[in-house]
Image (tube, helix red, strand yellow):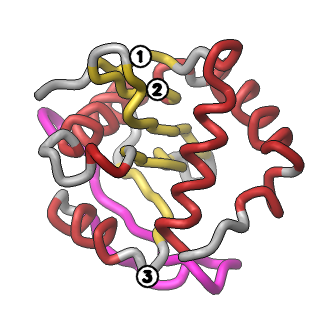
Amino acid sequence: MSLALEPIDLAAHASVCVAFRRDSFICSFGVDRFLDEAGPDGVHYVERLHLRTAKFPDGYVHAWHGDEIVGQIEMQILETPRRGYVNLFYLVQHMRGAGVSGELHEYAMSFMRRQGVQFVQLSVSPTNMRALAFYRKHGWRDLGLRPGRDNVHLMQRDVPAHGA
């Protein structure tokens, strides 16, 4: 099975982005608090996506399996220190464990290489065992609690020179 990774078309798929992000909160924290941060119908989240997709169009992609959107990656480059940051790795439930998550990771590492960053970070709930196992399998190190947040850990890995 193989996925096609294409830049997010917000005009057509903003509601898909909101649904995926909401589900990621449930998977991560066991509760749906996404709209508390994102505003009604995710309006603030979609506004941020518009800005970020304009700046990093190949960092905000949907994963397609045939004519179905089955996943989403959100990535950007942060400064001071300059590093990659993965805001979201997401697959719909029926695609988890189907052997395609590695494709998302490979795409992320390729994006980071093209951006010229040496390392990449992400935040993960310490209760999201499936995500933690995936990240560890792919070489991520747990740096402990993310500064300024008491409910997520910061993870980091080097960006490989070739391959993921």
- Horizontally, is 36 left or right of 50 in the view? right
First in sequence: mark 1 vs mark 3: 1
Q: Nearer the viewer, residue 27 or 83?
A: 27
- Whether residue 81 appears in magenta in the rendering, the answer is no
Residue 77 coordinates in the image, percent (x, y): 55, 39
Amino acid on which disc 1 is placed: Glu
Label 1 crowd bin: few (<14), some (14–19), many (20+), radius 10 Å: some
Quadrant for the N terminus, please: top left
| Residue stretch in magenta | 140-164
Label 2 crowd bin: few (<14), some (14–19), many (20+), radius 10 Å: many
Residue 81, quarter of picture: bottom right
Eyeballing the image, is 59 above or below 77? above
Give the distance between the C-alpha atoms of the residues marked 1 and 3, in whole angstroms: 30 Å
Residue 107 coordinates in the image, percent (x, y): 29, 31
Q: Say what secondary structure mark 2 lies in.
A: strand
- Label 1, on which residue? 6
Could you tell me which residue is drawn at 28 percent across and 54 percent down?
A: 158
- Horizontally, is 100 left or right of 15 in the view? left
- Label 3, on which residue? 126
